[in-house]
């Protein structure tokens, strides 16, 4: 389905003719009467499906459902975090008969997805992120996410063995808790190799801003960083720019190794196929869908890119050993004694937090050794 068609379908909702068409569609394809064993599932992406990043990871998960009998998939890409996403959701429900919708981007949740939850109480909506709260949000909404900070820690382990300058670089979008956790995890993984390693972070202010991402990457390399990673929607610009400057890279969201085969070390990837299959299995079986879904490496929600050719034997051994510990469960990235980069104590001697800890869900600090600010 082309983007041009999807945009015209969205615009159809603006016309009076669309109103009649939607009424007819609802009568012919009543979503609330759909059989549990046959369903349409909608996916909405804020960027292109082939962005080598956040959107591609979700699109790969959606693609894994296309062979399931009785399940139809409808997708729309490049939908901004505005009222446009409400029009897309309404179109998927009224024109395509969607009974389960995954609006995947952070900014889709409030007010857009919540408005559709109220308008279509018999349709299920599940949002990627940690924003759903049972005390204030509707039960036909929910959230799913993965503990990917451990993947960034593993990125850091490999980066720590690879760096010669002992300076790492991180290009980040916005200083929200998950991004801060990823930055901290990356550095702490590297510091498990060498406590003298530091990490410079540059915030671009946007999830997708290619020019600033390239500028930030170049600035980090200019300041001596020889291993770069990121948390932006599409790491493509960061990966290609860093590799072009001779730096090594660690990926995020999806596998970017084809973009820099010789310089790509490894990457923290989402495995949304596992998550979406769980939801669809429940939908087909007529079971209630969970409202709060989380998992990590051991649960198959997160995976690591294969180690690249530049990764040495010592790095491979520590990577494998650390991954094995994580797979057992209970691995702590944040543990004391540990201070923030502003000198505040964030974990005392003997204190440790696993990524599932409530204390980390509101993380507002960068750890010591990170050069940068959350402001």
Image (cartoon, rainbow, N blue to C red):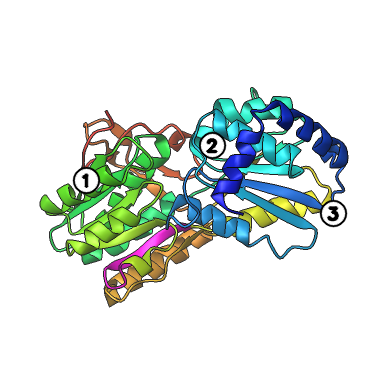
How many labels sit on residues? 3
Q: Which label was assigned to residue 216?
A: 1
Q: Point out the image quarter for the N terminus.
A: bottom right
The part of the image, by quadrant, that contains residue 21 is top right
Image coordinates of residue 308 in percent, x first then y, are 33, 72
Task: Look at the numbered disc 3 and give the secondary structure of its residue.
Answer: loop
Provide the secondary structure element on which disc 1 rests. helix
Residue at the location (41% across, 47% down)? 233
At horizontal 17% and vertical 61% (from top left) the residue drawn is: 245
Q: Nearer the viewer, residue 54 or 134?
A: 54
Real-space Cα distance between discs 1 and 2?
28 Å
Give the magenta part as a residue range.
260-269
Q: Position of residue 111 (x, y in %)?
A: 57, 25
Q: Which residue is mark 3?
A: 37
Whole-percent x, y for residue 272 in the image: 57, 55
- Tell me if residue 359 can be seen: yes
Classify 127 as above or below 280.
above
The one of 364 and 330 positioned closer to us in this rendering: 364
Kindly identify which residue carries mark 2.
Answer: 130
Q: Residues within 10 Å of mark 3 (few under 14, many from 20)?
A: some
- Evaluate if marks 3 and 2 touch, with contact meaning CB atoms under 8 Å apart: no
Reply yes or no: does residue 268 show up in magenta.
yes
First-in-chain label (1 vs 2): 2
Q: Does any portion of residue 88 appear in the rendered image?
A: no
């Amino acid at each position: 389905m082309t983007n041009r068609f999807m945009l015209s379908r969205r615009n159809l909702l603006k016309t009076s003719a669309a109103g009649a068409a939607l009424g007819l569609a609802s009568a012919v394809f009543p979503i609330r009467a759909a059989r549990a064993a046959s369903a349409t599932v909608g996916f909405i992406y804020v960027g292109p499906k082939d962005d080598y990043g956040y959107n591609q990871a979700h699109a790969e998960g959606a693609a894994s459902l296309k062979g399931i009998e009785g399940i139809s998939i409808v997708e729309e890409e490049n939908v901004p975090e505005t009222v446009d996403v409400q029009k897309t959701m309404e179109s998927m429900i009224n024109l395509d008969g969607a009974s389960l919708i995954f609006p995947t981007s952070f900014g889709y949740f409030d007010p857009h997805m919540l408005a559709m939850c109220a308008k279509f109480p018999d349709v299920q909506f599940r949002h990627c992120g940690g924003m759903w709260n049972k005390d204030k949000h509707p039960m036909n909404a929910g959230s799913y996410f993965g503990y990917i900070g451990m993947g960034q820690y593993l990125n850091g382990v490999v980066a720590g063995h690879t760096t010669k300058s002992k300076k790492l670089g991180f290009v980040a979008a916005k200083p929200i808790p998950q991004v801060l956790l990823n930055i901290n995890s990356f550095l702490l993984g590297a510091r498990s190799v060498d406590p003298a390693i530091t990490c410079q972070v540059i915030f671009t202010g946007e999830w997708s801003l290619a020019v600033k991402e390239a500028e930030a990457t170049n600035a980090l390399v200019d300041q001596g960083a020889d291993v770069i990673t990121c948390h932006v929607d599409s790491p493509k610009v960061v990966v290609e720019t860093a590799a072009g400057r001779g730096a090594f890279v660690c990926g995020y969201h999806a596998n970017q190794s084809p973009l820099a085969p010789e310089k790509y070390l490894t990457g923290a990837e989402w495995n949304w196929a596992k998550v979406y299959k769980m939801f669809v299995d429940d939908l087909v079986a007529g079971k209630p869908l969970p409202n709060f879904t989380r998992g990590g490496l051991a649960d198959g929600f997160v995976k690591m890119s294969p180690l690249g050719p530049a990764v040495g034997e010592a790095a491979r051994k520590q990577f494998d050993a650390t991954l094995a510990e994580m797979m057992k469960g209970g691995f702590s990235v944040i543990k004391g004694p540990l201070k923030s980069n502003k000198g505040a104590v964030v974990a005392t001697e003997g204190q440790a937090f696993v990524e599932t800890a409530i204390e980390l869900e509101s993380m507002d600090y960068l750890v010591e050794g990170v050069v940068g600010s959350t402001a």
